[in-house]
Image (spheres, rainbow, N blue to C red):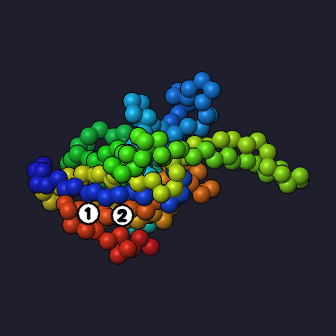
Amino acid sequence: MKLINIRQLTGIIRLRSGLHIGAGKDSVEIGGMDQPIIKDPVSKEPYIPGSSLKGKLRSLLETSAFMQNEGTRKAVLNGHPCDCGRKGCPACTIFGAHAAPQDCEDGLGPTRLIVRDATLTPEYRELFQQGRLPMEVKYENIIHRVKGVAEHPRPLERVPAGTCFTLNMAFRVYEGDSEDLLDKVYKGLKLIQLDALGGGGSRGSGQVVFEDLKIDGQPVDLNKITVF
Ligand SMILES: [Zn+2]
């Protein structure tokens, strides 16, 4: 396999609604919230893990009709990422053959897409450091079906709407790779815009928009990307 390029996909992720990417129970401080968001352990700044972004891209793409081959369809039906490892499978080529041995079968090669952690943009980092970007605490309830009143309020921590993070991805191009692979990544971003990022997406959280999207410095217009 011959690596011929590593393309840089950059942009801004702007939150249209509060974002909740959970930190997991291990990191809950005593007296802390039971649904905290993930934060940098040193700076305490919220960020979007590359794994969350990559996972959402992958799952939305794998469930989309235009991405499915037999292997992917089977994996999706079983509820897991594609692991067919076949050359020509866009999911396994872009994201890696999940749980399958690397460069298995007929030279699928390394995972093409590298998704970096998305940190606050300089502007929002400054606000955060000045204490002017407080995290939101949103209470979610269950409505009692007979009494019609809200019960069992649970606090959910969210990064407030409007906050911006930097999007930074790298895309490896190997000799013989189709240009179509990168188009699928654009489609995945468009799908995230139509869907949501993080937890509570069906209840209003995690609406995002990708702005100032560029590939190697050249603008990419997501409005022109069709997915359905
Ligand atoms: Zn596959």
For the C terminus, the image quarter is bottom left
Q: Position of residue 218 (x, y in %)?
A: 21, 66
Front-lying residue, 195 or 95: 195
- Estimate the x, y position of residue 29 in percent, counting from the top left: 56, 26
Res. 211 mark: 2
How far apart marks 2 and 1 lie (CA) works out to 9 Å
Residue, far top: 30
Please say if 8 is above or below 64.
above
Q: Check disc 1 and give the amino acid type.
A: Lys
Q: How many marks?
A: 2
Taking the image as shown, residue 138 lies to the left or right of residue 5, namely: right
How packed is label 1: few (under 14 Cα within 10 Å), some, or many (20 or more)? Answer: some
Q: Is residue 150 left or right of residue 197?
A: right
- The residue lying toward the viewer, choosing from 201 and 123, is 123
Res. 221 image quadrant: bottom left
Q: Residue at x 13, y 55 (%)?
A: 5
Question: Crowdedness of circle 2 by 10 Å Cα count: few (<14), some, many (20+)?
Answer: some
* View extreme (bottom): residue: 224
Q: Which mark is residue 171?
A: none
> Quick check: 201 above or below 105?
below
Task: Please say whether residue 65 is visible from this viewpoint.
Answer: yes
Tell me which amino acid carries mark 2.
Glu
The residue at 23%/62% (across/down) is: 215
- Position of 143 with respect to 222 (left or right) is right
The residue that mark 1 highlights is 214
Q: Secondary structure at mark 1?
A: strand
Can you tell me whether the CB of the residue at mark 1 lies under 8 Å from the nearest atom of ligand 1?
no
Q: Is mark 2 within 8 Å of ligand 1?
A: no
Q: Please name the residue shown 22% across and 55% down the image.
A: 8
Q: Nearer the viewer, residue 4 or 53?
A: 53
Can you give x and y, in whole percent of width and height, for residue 166 in the image? 34, 52
